[in-house]
Amino acid sequence: MRELRALVVDDSSLNRRTIAAILRDIAGISEVDVARDGADALRAVETSPPDFITLDLDMPRLDGFEFLQLLMDRHPLPVVVVSGLSAKEHIFRALELGAIDFIEKPQGGEAPLECLRDQLVEKVRIVQQLSPLALQHDLADVSGFDAELGVPGRRMPEPSVLKRVPSKVIVVGASTGGPRALVTLFRHLRDDLDAALVIAQHMPARFTRTFADRLDKTGVATVSEAKAYERLARGHAYVCPGGRCIEIVPSDRGPALRVVAPDQGSHYVPSVDQLFSSAARVLGDKAIGVVLTGMGEDGAKGARDIFSQGGSVLVEAPETAVVSGMPMAVQRIGVQHHSLGIWALGDMLAELTRPSRR
């Protein structure tokens, strides 16, 4: 693994010293610099760009949100937010502005500091696997997204009762970098897409409902957190609740959802493989699997199941995925698939769901 130079940005001198000391003890970190706010951090980046940044959000002069927007416009770099501003709207705003992950700042004591160290070790490992090109592509689709205002978009008219059952179902799996990738994907969906979408994003339980609400603001599809035994509808998207797994099941009026507890010892929650494999069983060639950015191999086996039943498989191009592990896993097991940049996946989904292909 490559050696990394880190920049710690925090207005608290105690926090700067603590985070910097932890990073210096992590294998793979060659140098750690510090900055007391966003303005100092921008000057540091201009002078000697680091390989990644830990960023507080609540700072004087130039706060973390303003810094993120300026940084991603000028010098896209991996940013891990380490902040006490852990309200869900703050986390997703930071992720949508370009941060790759979030750590809640511990509140004193030895155990919280050990937890912080463990999380920083994990984030360093993620940064070492990042695709450099993914941080340089056009961020216009996400950098202006505002939590309060949202983005006005065309909303698909509510279909009649007879047309609510979708012709295809698109199942999507994502992990690290997924929130930003999903916002971009939804911005590129077409409003005549004759499909429903079901999303398994690796994410803590308390965040998924807020994430669904934020995706809903992108327009086109109606997005909600999935409910057990909810029937799938054309033009709707369903986010698996955090801490649970989701499956496609048959019903007397078309495909529906089942939300279940994860198997004991499950490594990935929600399980993309579990979602994809259920879609293959129930939908056959009407299933479309989409594997986005993320570490690990979740989704590869399920993608093979979809392909074996005549469905289609798409992956975010490893060159543009923030973390290429999940897309590369699909390639390694030899599943036939389309590999596209995140901004091109929407057009391919429109092609795969147009009437002549049903």
Image: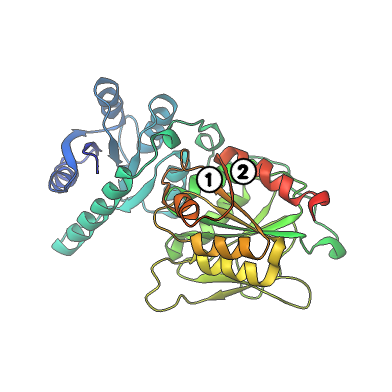
Q: Is residue 106 left or right of residue 163?
A: left
Q: Earlier in the sequence, mark 1 or mark 2?
A: 1
Q: Residue 22, image x and y in percent?
A: 15, 48
* Front-most of residues 29 and 21: 29
Q: Is residue 17 left or right of residue 262?
A: left
For the C terminus, which image quadrant? Answer: bottom right
Q: Residue at x 30, y 34 (%)?
A: 60
Can you say whether 190 is above or below 284 in the image? above
Kind of residue at disc 1: Glu
Q: Residue at x 51, y 70 (%)?
A: 245
Image quadrant where residue 347 sits: top right
Instruction: Classify mark 1: helix, strand or loop.
Output: strand
For the N terminus, which image quadrant? Answer: top left
Q: Residue furthest top?
A: 47
* Front-most of residues 314 and 322: 314
Can you say whether 81 is above or below 235 in the image? above
Q: Are marks 1 and 2 in contact (CB under 8 Å)?
A: yes
Kind of residue at disc 2: Leu
* Front-most of residues 246 and 208: 246
Label number found at residue 343: none
> Would you name the residue on which mark 2 appears?
345
* Front-most of residues 21 and 28: 28
